[in-house]
Amino acid sequence: MSENKIWLSSPHMGGTERDYVNLAFDTNWVAPLGPNVSGFENDLSAYLKESPVAVLSSGTAALHLALLQCGVGHGDEVICQSFTFSASANPITYLGATPVFVDSEAITWNISPQYLEEAIVDRIAKGKKPKAIVAVHLYGMPYLVDEVHAVANKYEIPIVEDSAEALGSTYKGKNCGTFGHYGILSFNGNKIITTSGGGALVCPSEEAKQHTIFLATQARDDAPHYQHSSIGYNYRLSNISAGIGRGQMEVLDTHIDLRRKMNHFYQELFKECEGITVFQEPNEDFHSNHWLSAILVDPEKTNGVTREDIRLAFAKANIESRPLWKPMHMQPIFENCAFYGEKTAFHLFKNGLCLPSGSNLTSEDRQRIEKVIFDILSL
Ligand SMILES: *Cc1c(COP(=O)(O)O)cnc(C)c1O
């Protein structure tokens, strides 16, 4: 194909990342500790209004250590938003626990407070109170924080807030990642900032942060020799990766502005398109980083043009787009797990499409995207 590929979301370096990586080489801190590790933690902590943060090798590792510290163990049940990426649910099984899936509501596409309560009540009636709840801010959109936390508080169940896609998003002015008992962040290659791979755990206290680092560095007791009284993990972020993270923090807010501009571009593009709606914040309480912009397609109103027709037209033009997450309760690996809800997540999966959303897209890229849409919808 002659034209460059337009990606859904690709790494976007600011420029100073290399300086921090060079610093690691110059001082020989080529290890999973060093000045960039603590520097990146301080940057994140300051960004999240002084919440304690431990940087780790991935968001998945952060979820694992969060659930572990919520006391999740063998035979337990953990409630998880069904409409999400599999990494939200997988760590539940690492601990020998079982996920119980809950449907989304149609406003933020995240966990439905109503079905969450129904699930909790039913699991308790069946003899097992869920140990934790994994709630997700998908595509950067905050979930219904007040309503979801009211349910969790009523039954005194801790929330692990999966904020992997929502660094920089806020709800009522407060940062996503700081609402849950624990919050997790991801710096994978496609996220709003990247360290090539990496993640972080936002902790409820300085002690919890220190305990997270202890667990993430093989759980070594305080002794001159190697002594262990608990099982450890090798989950710390490297000083090289953390250097990339420090550079990325300098451009985070600028990149969020650019992602939000991409979302605005789609709102304008589809304004006159009958049957296509761009996913948007419901009101001013919600501020999304718009990590990914997404649309819902109603073929009954688009003269039969489906989500899949649009995806294929983009693919032909060397432009990446992707169906929304396939719900976990529909995944072969989780087909025996309990599910509470109806068909909201299923409907989103069936009719939704994520569009190129990177902060590094150019006006030529936008013209190519626009042309595909004009052609397929005969505008
Ligand atoms: C990316 C992502 C994760 C996992 O993060 P990694 O750093 O890739 O392990 C978890 N949950 C959601 C919703 C994600 O998008």
Image (spheres, helix red, strand yellow):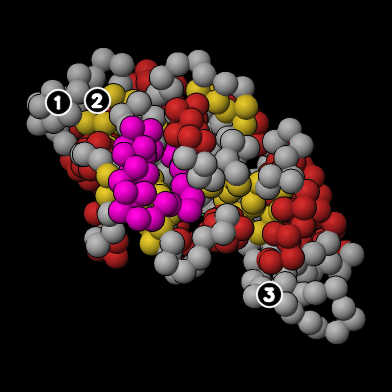
Q: Nearer the viewer, residue 344 or 160?
A: 160
Residue for badge 1: 302
Amino acid type at mark 1: Thr
Q: Secondary structure at mark 1?
A: loop
Label 3 Cα crowd, 10 Å radius (few <14 / some 14-19 / many 20+):
few
Amino acid type at mark 2: Ile
- Above or below 306: residue 129: below
Q: Earlier in the sequence, mark 1 or mark 3?
A: 3
Task: Report x, y in % for residue 201.
Answer: 64, 51
Circles 1, 2 touching at the beta carbon (< 8 Å) = yes
- Above or below 333: residue 379: above
Q: Secondary structure at mark 2?
A: strand
Residue for badge 2: 276
Number of residue marks? 3
Residue for badge 3: 230
Instruction: Inspect the magenta stretch and tell me whether residue 268 lies in it.
Output: no
Q: Secondary structure at mark 3?
A: loop
